């Protein structure tokens, strides 16, 4: 692994290879292992061996005997499985969106919340929790819809603000507009929250993010957006490589820079907004996963984009397992786990890749 | 120069006279009122307690969350984000709080206002002690004793009304839709203990303050025999919404319709209305 990283460091940008077979296989294996652990581990003990027969028993005409009783079945397939699926979708989406933002804005610190998605979603969710309180239940559409609408509205305003600065300063202006929007929406959100301290607990729980109440319905809401967005982003992986050279260079190579940037930003934003609306704000995934891929595999977006998608999914599934087992049967906010595990892991990756160089 | 000195001296003397006069006036008010008569309550529970023991007439202002009893002088004062000036504006001689963010109590004390922090009770016994304490401070000893006596008597009768076979139900107390719950080391937990219920949140009680967030799969696997929803107002929860949660239909309480739709406010305070709460819980415990 370190040898690969060393090569990648030695020849940044010019690195032409896409996803190597080995790196691809390792990442997919990591995701599959994470999914299996996610299904097998939790506060309630369900035998690993009975997961597959239990799944097969739902397939018609196979006549596999259902090995689990009603309670274990409910725990496994109605509580744990949607949680694992949702964590995978959200993790993949945040990581691939983070990678794309970093490419399109040529800024390694960009994360998927950059253009005001987080602030807008937070404000939308807070308004829904506070003013539609009776309707704002875990099994209701109100909060996810409001969060989604808030995120999109915030990004549209950010984009309009950024554009008004003129095309030549586009990337810088967009980032600044995003910061402005984030600050403004955070101010309004805090004000609304302080006016309704009785709902503080609910608002806070949403802001921290997590999959405690994940259902198949959440998965169904989120999946189409994640599928379309990540497909668009993966298809743009070569364009991202070209864009990383600079706008003028990209244009001279025949790329319609403005249009490519808009497509990537729209796809990343829609996907992120859908992910955030069902999971709340989970920080750090969008930064740590793409950079780990860069350090370990390749700096080319042909590798970073697809591998971030797969590795991000696995990463968030694993952190969610930790979140629900460390204090079992109590829950830990997942943001605490992503940062607590992610930061040291990333520090090690950073160190070893430097040592290799 | 000489004239100036005289002027300054005169001004000083005038100021001294004003101060001593106002001090005398204060002493005068104190002597006519042995007990505080301008009370501000920034705690909904203390507000309920004060009115229950008969000290309501001495209360001049209560915070924006004190929605019971209706006749309490509700203001826009906040007990969560308190403003010292706004509180001082009511010229209180005693302020009750249950929460002291940013140590605002010491600021009030600097203004010469007496502040008493009535902490959130973690058991029925502590709640009784607090009511008796409020009685002593406000001159309503007898009223306070009567309230505590009545609470004890009614709670004992309510518990007795539940048949012995329903005294050991597994209980899940829900604070919000993220499955935050309360262990038996909390006030509400002490009420369940009175019934003999076993609190499923105790399984997660090792860390924290007695209000853990439970995993959905743990709740389903524990299959509580009675569920108490303290999130009916905040989050619109009901028997129907609980039964509709994926996987929850296997839970005993859902199968036997033993789901209590409690009033969020009553269930989160530690005042005399806990008797009503216990009565509702008992009614549902006897069902099914």
Image: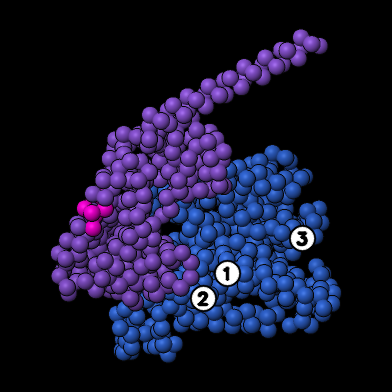
Chain colours: A blue, B purple
Q: Nearer the viewer, residue B246 or B8?
A: B8
Note whether A252 is above or below B89 in the view shown: below
Question: In which image quadrant can residue B37 be found?
Answer: top left
For image coordinates 63% across by 79% down, the residue present is A27
Q: Is residue A80 left or right of residue A116?
A: left
Q: Find residue A326 and name its label.
A: 2
- Badge 1 and badge 2 both on one subunit: yes
How would you rate the neighbour count of disc 1 (Cα within 10 Å): few for under 14, some for 14-19, many for 20 or more? some
Q: Find residue A243 and name its label.
A: none
Residue underneath mark 3: A244
Can you tell which of label 1 and label 3 is closer to the viewer? Answer: 1
Q: Quick one: SS at disc 3? A: loop
Q: Nearer the viewer, residue B133 or A216?
A: B133
First-in-chain label (3 vs 2): 3
Note whether A348 is above or below A251 in the view shown: below
For image coordinates 52% across by 44% down, the residue present is B105
Q: Is residue A24 left or right of residue A153?
A: right
Disc 3 to disc 2, how far (Cα)? 41 Å
Can you tell which of label 3 and label 2 is closer to the viewer? Answer: 2
For the record, the magenta segment spans B147-152
Residue underneath mark 1: A337
First-in-chain label (1 vs 3): 3
Residue B280 image position (x, y, % from top left): 21, 57
């Amino acid at each position: 692994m370190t040898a690969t990283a060393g090569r990648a460091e030695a020849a940044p940008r010019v690195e032409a290879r896409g996803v190597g077979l080995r790196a691809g296989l390792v990442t997919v294996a990591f995701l599959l292992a994470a999914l299996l652990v996610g299904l097998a581990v939790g506060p309630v003990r369900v035998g690993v061996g009975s997961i597959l027969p239990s799944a097969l028993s739902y397939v018609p005409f196979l006549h596999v005997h259902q090995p689990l009783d009603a309670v274990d079945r409910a725990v496994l397939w109605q509580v744990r499985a949607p949680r694992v699926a949702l964590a995978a979708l959200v993790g993949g989406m945040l990581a691939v969106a983070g990678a794309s933002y970093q490419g399109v804005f040529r800024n390694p610190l960009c994360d998927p919340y950059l253009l005001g998605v987080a602030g807008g979603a937070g404000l939308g969710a807070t308004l829904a929790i506070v003013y539609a309180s009776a309707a704002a239940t875990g099994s209701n559409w109100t909060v996810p819809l409001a969060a989604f609408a808030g995120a999109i509205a915030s990004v549209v305003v950010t984009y309009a603000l950024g554009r008004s600065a003129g095309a030549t300063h586009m990337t810088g202006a967009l980032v600044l507009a995003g910061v402005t929007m984030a600050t403004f929406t955070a101010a309004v959100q805090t004000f609304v929250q302080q006016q309704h301290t009785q709902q503080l607990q609910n608002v806070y729980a949403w802001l921290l993010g997590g999959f405690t109440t994940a259902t198949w319905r959440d998965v169904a809401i989120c999946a189409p957006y994640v599928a379309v967005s990540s497909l668009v982003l993966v298809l743009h992986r070569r364009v991202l490589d070209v864009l990383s050279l600079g706008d003028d260079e990209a244009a001279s190579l025949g790329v319609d820079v403005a249009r490519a940037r808009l497509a990537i930003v729209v796809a990343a934003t829609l996907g992120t907004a859908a992910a955030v609306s069902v999971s709340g704000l989970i920080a750090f995934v969008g930064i740590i996963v793409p950079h780990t891929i860069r350090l370990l595999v390749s700096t080319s977006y042909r590798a970073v984009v697809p591998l971030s998608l797969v590795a991000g999914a696995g990463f968030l599934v694993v952190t969610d397992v930790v979140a629900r087992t460390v204090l079992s049967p109590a829950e830990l906010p997942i943001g605490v786990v992503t940062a607590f595990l992610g930061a040291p892991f990333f520090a090690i990756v950073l160190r070893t890749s430097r040592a290799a160089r | 120069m000489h004239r100036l000195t005289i002027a300054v001296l005169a001004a000083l003397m005038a100021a001294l006279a004003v101060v001593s006069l106002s001090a005398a006036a204060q002493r005068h008010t104190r002597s006519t009122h042995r007990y505080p008569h301008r009370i501000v309550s920034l705690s909904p529970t203390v507000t309920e307690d004060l009115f229950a023991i008969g000290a309501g007439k001495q209360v001049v202002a209560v915070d924006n969350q004190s929605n019971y009893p209706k006749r309490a002088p509700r203001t826009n004062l906040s007990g969560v984000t308190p403003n010292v000036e706004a509180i001082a504006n009511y010229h209180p001689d005693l302020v009750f709080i249950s929460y002291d963010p940013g140590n605002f109590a010491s600021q009030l004390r600097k203004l010469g206002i007496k502040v008493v922090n009535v902490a959130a009770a973690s058991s029925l016994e502590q709640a009784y002690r607090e009511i008796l304490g409020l009685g002593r401070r406000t001159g309503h000893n007898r009223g306070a004793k009567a309230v505590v006596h009545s609470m004890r008597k009614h709670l004992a009768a309510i518990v007795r009304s539940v048949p012995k076979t329903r005294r050991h139900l597994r209980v899940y107390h829900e604070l919000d839709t993220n499955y935050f719950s309360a262990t038996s080391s909390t006030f509400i937990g002490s009420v369940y203990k009175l019934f003999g219920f076993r609190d499923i949140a105790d399984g997660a009680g090792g860390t924290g303050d007695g209000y853990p967030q439970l995993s959905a799969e743990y709740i389903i696997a524990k299959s509580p025999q009675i569920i108490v929803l303290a999130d009916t107002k905040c989050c619109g929860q009901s028997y129907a919404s609980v039964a509709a949660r994926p996987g929850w239909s296997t839970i005993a309480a859902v199968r036997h319709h033993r789901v209590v739709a409690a009033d969020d406010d009553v269930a989160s305070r530690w005042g005399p209305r806990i008797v009503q709460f216990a009565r509702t819980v008992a009614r549902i415990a006897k069902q099914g």
